[in-house]
Image (cartoon, helix red, strand yellow):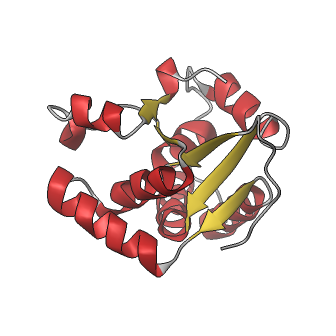
Amino acid sequence: MRRRGLHRSSKSIVVDTSVFAEHVNASSPYRSKLNELFETSRSRVALFIPTVTLSETLYVLSRIYKLAGRPSPNSDALNYINWIKSRATTVGDEGLAISAGELKKELKLALPDCYVIATAEKLNGIALFAKLEEEMKGREKTLRKLRVSFVEEFVL
């Protein structure tokens, strides 16, 4: 894990791929809120990303950029990944793999989502998703206990 110094006042936020997909969507109602989150990441919050989220984000953004007709969708997605890495700490280790697997058994969510939640648990932080996903419905109470939050309700 790459470490950065964290101040006591820093809020640890683990970001899901859905948040990045929302951020690149020019028509997203949350774009300015997400710009603020990513620009304040060095002063008021500490952002973290599981390594599996980097992989998923590369794949998802490459598809989004391709559908948008960008001439170099993979290059654009890689540039975005580098931009993310300049603002966040990537996290991944064996302990997280085990924790994510345990959450997968319990919650029946997508494995990358379980990594986001497991990382937030490890850091005593917030797992930030763009919105309540279909597979999360009916599990809101458990997700709240795990400190899962969604962009529309998130306050810096």
Quarter of the rendering occupied by the C terminus = top right
Quarter of the rendering occupied by the N terminus = bottom right
Whether residue 23 is visible: yes
User: Residue at the spot x=34%, y=65% of the render?
Assistant: 100
> Percent position (x, y) of residue 55?
51, 70
In the image, is 121 to the left or to the right of 1? left
In the image, is 103 to the left or to the right of 18? left
The relative height of residue 38 versus residue 101 in the rendered view (above or below) is: above
> Percent position (x, y) of residue 33?
66, 24
Q: How many marks?
A: 0
The residue positioned farthest toward the bottom in the image shown = 94
The residue positioned farthest toward the front in the image shown = 8
Location of residue 141 by image quarter: top left
In the image, is 95 to the left or to the right of 28? left
The relative height of residue 41 versus residue 121 in the rendered view (above or below) is: above
Of residue 17 and residue 75, the one placed in the foreground of this image is: 17
User: Residue at the spot x=75%, y=66% of the render?
Assistant: 3
User: Residue at the spot x=48%, y=59% of the render?
Assistant: 63
User: Residue at the spot x=24%, y=36% of the render?
Assistant: 142
Whether residue 108 is visible: no
> Percent position (x, y) of residue 108?
17, 54
> Percent position (x, y) of residue 8?
77, 40
